[in-house]
């Protein structure tokens, strides 16, 4: 189960016994909710692991432990369609790709991000862009 949570809160309690206690409490809360939807599932659970934004931050280095870049909100959702700039003013031959310039993130989207930039570079260099599907 994945849900949005408050980074600042987890960071405040990180390194204290409350952090582990909170993880257990959150897991139990979610399991109890799940049990209401799928009666009997609780008895089938063999192992529970809770990752917080601090866990993601530790493993990925991502800002605030974000798993897919921008959190999709009313403000950021339109950026998925409008797009974000991939270059920086005054810095030639520099292009950004990945989840922080493609709101929504995910592996397919960041792969597309790289592909699109190559297409743009080919266009700027007046070279033919050709891509072949991986078989
Ligand atoms: C737990 C988890 C589960 C996920 N599950 C899925 C899933 O099921 N399906 C899916 O599609 N997506 C999933 N995602 C999201 C997906 O993994 C990301 O959106 C995607 O990997 C982002 O790719 P990226 O290239 O933008 O960034 P990253 O993959 O984070 O790559 C950035 C790279 O830059 C390197 N780097 C950072 N700073 C520097 C520096 N200063 N110098 C040099 N290198 C640097 C980092 O080490 C890293 O290798 C998941 C993410 C997480 C965290």
Image (cartoon, helix red, strand yellow):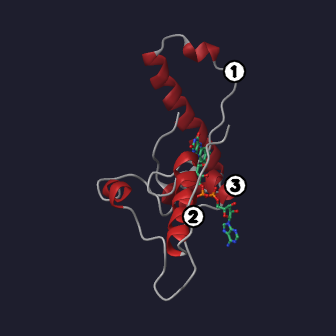
Secondary element at tag 2: helix
The outermost residue toward the bottom is 90
Tag 2 residue: 118
Q: Position of residue 31 (x, y in %)?
A: 53, 25
Residue 15 visible here: no
From the Cβ of disc 3, is ligand 1 less than 8 Å away?
A: yes
The answer to which image quadrant residue 28 occupies is top right
Q: CA distance from mark 2 to mark 1?
A: 46 Å
| Mark sitting earlier along the chain (2/1) | 1
Give the residue pinned by disc 3. 59
Name the residue located 49 percent from the left edge and 89 percent from the top edge. Answer: 90
Judge left or right: residue 9 versus residue 51. Answer: left
Q: Which mark is residue 46?
A: 1
Label 1 neighbourhood size at 10 Å, few (<14), some (14-19), many (20+)? few
Q: Position of residue 99 (x, y in %)?
A: 52, 58
In front: 126, or 110?
126
Residue at the image position 43 percent from the left and 17 percent from the top: 37
74 in relation to 86, above or below: above
Rendered image quadrant of residue 27: top right
Taking 26 as reference, is 8 above or below it? below
First reached walking from the N terminus: tag 2 or tag 3: 3
Residue 34 screen position, x and y as percent: 48, 22
Q: Nearer the viewer, mark 1 or mark 3?
A: 3
In this rendering, would 38 be left or right of 42?
Answer: left
Q: Are marks 2 and 1 in contact (CB under 8 Å)?
A: no
Q: Residue at x 34, y 55 (%)?
A: 81
Using the numbered discs, state the Cα–Cα distance from disc 1 to disc 3 in whole angstroms: 24 Å
The span from disc 2 to disc 3 (Cα, nearest Å) is: 29 Å
């Amino acid at each position: 189960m994945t849900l949005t949570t408050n980074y600042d809160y987890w960071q405040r309690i990180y390194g204290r016994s409350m952090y582990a206690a909170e993880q257990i409490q959150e897991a139990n809360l979610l399991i109890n909710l799940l049990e209401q939807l799928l009666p009997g599932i609780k008895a089938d659970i063999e192992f529970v692991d809770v990752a917080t934004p601090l866990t993601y931050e530790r493993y990925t280095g991502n800002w605030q432990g974000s798993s897919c870049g921008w959190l999709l909100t009313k403000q950021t959702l339109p950026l998925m369609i409008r797009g974000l700039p991939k270059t920086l003013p005054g810095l030639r031959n520099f292009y950004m790709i990945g989840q922080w310039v493609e709101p929504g993130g995910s592996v397919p989207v960041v792969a597309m991000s790289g592909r699109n930039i190559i297409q743009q570079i080919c266009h700027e260099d007046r070279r033919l862009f050709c891509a072949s599907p991986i078989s």
